[in-house]
Image: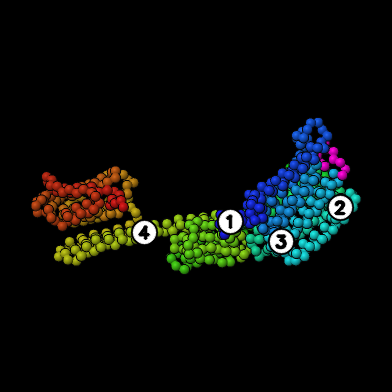
Amino acid sequence: MNSDTPMGAETAAGLARGGGLPVTPAVRLVLVALVGLAALTVVFWLVGTHWQGPGGFLAAIAAQDLRFWMQIVTGLGAWLISAWVWALKPRNPDVALFALSGLATLTFTFSFAPPSAVDVALPVGLMSLLFHVNFAGAVAFGIVMPILLMRYPVRLPFHRALSVAIIAVFGIWSLIAAIGPMERLAWGYMITFIEMLCICAAVIAQYFATRNRPRDRAIAIWLGVSVLVGSGAFISLIAAPIALGFGPLVDEHYALSSFLLIYVGLAVGLTRYRVFELGEWAFYVLFYVVGALILLTVDGLLIVALSIDPRTAFGVSLLAVAVAYLPARDWLWRRFMQRRRLEEHELFQAIIDVAFEPAGGERQSRWRSLFAKLHDPLAFEPVAEGAPDAAIVDDGVGLYVPATADLPAMVMRHPWRGRGLFGPRHLRTARYLVDILQRAEAGRRAYDRGVAEERARIARDMHDNIGAQLLSALHSPAPERKNLMIGQTLSDLRDIIRNATRPGLPVEEALADLRAETAERLEPTDIVLDWIARGEQTAILAPDTAHALRSLVREGVSNIIRHAGATKAEVAIDYSGEEIRLQIADDGRGFDPAAIANGAGLNSMRARVGALDGDFELARAEPGTTIRARLPLAGRPQVAG
């Protein structure tokens, strides 16, 4: 293996130190487990060899109660957790201190287990030795833990001098207690009590020292809650009552289990696991613990002070927590964790403003302004290329927002003016905003396409119909013809203006206008109009079909007026199903097929029908002429691709 790589370097160093054994994290973890197994073997051996009950070694172990096993679980758990972190980061001095505290916890819990075992009689000398080992382990834990908390997550001022002072004071005090008579070992509870107070003081100092460092503040809060809850339980239940001359409030075998919370919290903090969530986790833990303490305190006061029945007292305590504590907890959560929030309508309004802002600097400014209102970051950094999805960067210091439409990707840094971190909730908000903006962008583009297509249709109608009709009217020598064409042009223009934004027109509405126009045209000619319309009342006529139908009726009626010599004109329209069928007939003189085969009006009618993929037919009748046409209601057929 190449020793230039990190793995190769670690393996080479391990070979040099271990005489051929590569000291990898897995190997270190195995060694850690062997240490714990060896300590457990010693405890079991002491219990088994001094067992006074019936049966052998296995019977002695099986006979032990929950108090015994709580010592084993607490000590072994603390050692494995702390040593596991050390196996991952062996060169980190803070992690080494953490592992040393775990070894101290293993020492004082395991040495406490055999004397408290059921039906085990230890010699006086061995009992004295175990008490001294227990005392030394407890004092060592109390020395190492404040030293660690003065160094992590930030180095406190004068931490070296304070560390030396802690070692000197508690070391000398413990030595005096250990070399004297057995009664002096009772000083251990006072020493432990003072050490726990030092631990709490270090946690509080870390909170203030990290006020301008959001990542370290999140770790300090998490460690503070973990340590204060874990050590606070031991202080309030065991150390403080004994130091003040009273008995412990609960069996100390059970109270020691609170140390596991300290080790879980420190392990999470030292590995910097999900730093951006540690602050919220800490508040969750703190809220639940405080709620439980209030519940127990109120319950105890009601029972002791007022002599209320326990069941009634517990119910009143639950009511007090629900009425007083839960609203206060919610207020604190909004005050310290939620910070500013925008209502749903404000978010939507801001997104719409961004989506419909013309491209340019103002559009980007609105997008940044929305995130500034939400998170108040100290800086926005543009990103040339990035991932397609939002992400938390630098342990919560930054939040990456991907590029959207013409808006470039960016990274926000140091939210809430550098007093917080981005977390999963803020990541979900960013993804939600990006998704809504993309949807709004898609809607705006569809709207723009629709507007462009409608403008193109209006321009086409103006060019093909209005322009052509006005030009024909301009060059028409007959005044009546000129007036007729101008009137039709005005009607077409009114229809274009009225229906420009409508995707379709009810057939009844279109036919009513067309009938009125046709009757008005035929009235001066003494030609009787017979208008027949049948079909579904809810049918919708596409704009291009409506325009073609109107042109066919106009041209057909014009031919009747000019050429047929008729006394009656029949217009029958059937719009059932998905098509509209038109028939225009008169009782006039008919026509010569050869004379009108290439007429401009008929060719125009055929072209309009053909453009809609319809059918057109011109036929002689006895008497008169008949025009038949079939058109789709939906308009011009769509061509794939």
Marks 2/3 in contact by CB < 8 Å: the verdict is: no
- Distance from Cα at disc 2 to Cα at disc 3: 29 Å
- Distance from Cα at disc 1 to Cα at disc 4: 61 Å
For disc 1, the marked residue is 8
Q: Which residues are magenta?
A: 115-125
- Distance from Cα at disc 4 to Cα at disc 2: 88 Å
Element under label 2? helix
Q: Residue furthest bottom?
A: 361
For disc 2, the marked residue is 178
Callout 2 amino acid: Ala
Pick the front one: 270 or 38: 38
Estimate how packed mark 3 is, as few (under 14), some (14 to 19) or many (20 or more) residues with alpha carbons within 10 Å.
some
What is the number of the mark on residue 151? 3
Q: Earlier in the sequence, mark 1 or mark 3?
A: 1
Residue depicted at x 87% and y 44%: 125
**Which quadrant of the rendered structure holds the N terminus?**
bottom right
Callout 1 amino acid: Gly
Residue depicted at x 16% and y 49%: 618
For disc 4, the marked residue is 449
Element under label 4? helix
Q: How is the image coloured?
A: rainbow
Q: Position of residue 191 (x, y in %)?
A: 83, 54
Q: Residue furthest top?
A: 54
- Distance from Cα at disc 3 to Cα at disc 4: 63 Å
